[in-house]
Image: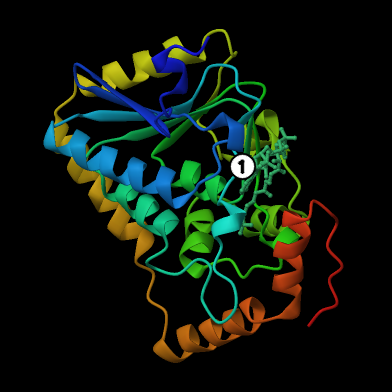
């Protein structure tokens, strides 16, 4: 028999504050923690709540031992036809900005596979602690989607451009050792120890002067995020991106994903 709590809708994220540490646990495993607007808006709201409680360090994680940390942007919600699928106002972009401007470290604790926009989300955290089961993939070329320039800047601030190109052009997952080698993750920690390791790191940082920590984070954000691009160059890039998201290939990419079949890209 179903007791009340078994039928009650599960929260899409679980939040917890203990001392100076706030934790967000992605909680939609049926959809592989796909980054739906519901999940992303909840994450952004949770960061606002944490800020109001002067939470000093945030951990973003999935449930212990998951095979998929997050399947990336909810493909069903990707805008189609004449609308930028990763525009400034997209819930994913709003969540990334909330992470990057949170006045304290946001640590991604990763187990399992990370896909697409979830890679950008993890990379937007201040540090990534991952276990041996973690993999990372960025997948716009699987959908025919023009990734946004801010997202590419997030990658450029962290990774060599030849490795970024390999990740974007192949859309292949990279494993924990490769991710550590190139600097995607700060520490590879055995899955049996990763919770304690991440908690200890967060608690250690939380003993430091929070105002001094917050100002260094904001200084590094403005130094890395604000690369000047000439207006004409930006408009040319946006025009190129529009041709991609208005292409038949982008429609085919989404249709194929939803139909669970391989896409046939024709270059138009
Ligand atoms: C909606 C999903 C998703 C999902 N959206 O389980 O990087 S960009 O530019 O491309 C950006 C726009 C982006 O992030 O795009 C999304 C990129 N993500 C991916 O390519 C990963 C897509 N997902 C998968 O490859 C598989 O789901 C993985 C390998 C993550 C897990 O495979 P598994 O066999 O364990 P299913 O595929 O059966 O998925 C379970 C349910 O979650 C839904 C999927 O449709 C299914 O729902 P139904 O049971 O209703 O069919 N799901 C998974 N990923 N990104 N929904």
Q: Position of residue 258 (x, y in %)?
A: 72, 55
In percent of the image, x 42 and y 43: which residue is there? 39
Question: Where 183 sits versus 23, above or below?
Answer: below
Q: Position of residue 104 (x, y in %)?
A: 24, 37
Mark 1 close to ligand 1, CB under 8 Å: yes
Query: In this figure, which residue is indicated by the disc labeled 1?
Result: 71
In percent of the image, x 41 and y 47: which residue is there? 38
Quick one: SS at disc 1?
loop
Q: Position of residue 235 (x, y in %)?
A: 47, 88
Question: Where 213 sits versus 5, above or below?
Answer: below
Q: Nearest the camera: 190 or 55?
A: 55
Q: Residues within 10 Å of mark 1 (few under 14, many from 20)?
A: many
Colour scheme employed for the rendering of this structure: rainbow
Is residue 21 rendered to the left or right of residue 108? left
Task: Name the image quarter holding residue 143.
Answer: bottom right
Q: How many marks?
A: 1
In percent of the image, x 51 and y 74: which residue is there? 84
């Amino acid at each position: 028999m179903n007791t009340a709590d078994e039928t009650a809708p599960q929260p899409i994220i679980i939040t917890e504050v203990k001392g100076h540490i706030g934790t967000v646990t992605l909680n939609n495993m049926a959809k592989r923690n796909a980054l739906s607007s519901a999940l992303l808006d909840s994450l952004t709201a949770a960061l606002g709540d944490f800020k109001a409680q002067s939470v000093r360090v945030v951990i973003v994680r999935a449930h212990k031992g998951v095979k998929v940390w997050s399947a990336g942007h909810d493909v069903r919600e990707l805008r189609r036809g004449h609308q930028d699928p990763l525009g400034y106002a997209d819930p994913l972009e709003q969540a990334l900005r909330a992470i990057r401007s949170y006045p304290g470290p946001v640590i991604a604790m990763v187990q399992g596979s990370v896909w697409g926009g979830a890679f950008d989300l993890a990379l937007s955290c201040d540090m990534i602690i991952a276990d041996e089961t973690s993999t990372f993939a960025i997948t716009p070329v699987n959908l025919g989607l023009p990734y946004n320039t801010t997202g590419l800047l997030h990658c450029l601030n962290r990774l060599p451009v030849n490795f970024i190109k390999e990740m974007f052009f192949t859309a292949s997952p990279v494993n924990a050792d490769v991710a550590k080698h190139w600097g995607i993750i700060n520490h590879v920690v055995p899955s049996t120890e990763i919770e304690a390791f991440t908690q200890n790191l967060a608690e250690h940082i939380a003993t430091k002067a929070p105002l001094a920590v917050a100002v260094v984070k904001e200084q590094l954000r403005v130094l890395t995020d604000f690369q000047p691009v000439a207006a004409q160059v930006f408009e040319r890039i946006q025009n190129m991106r529009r041709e991609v998201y208005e292409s038949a290939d982008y429609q085919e990419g989404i249709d194929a994903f939803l139909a669970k079949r391989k896409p046939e890209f024709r270059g138009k």
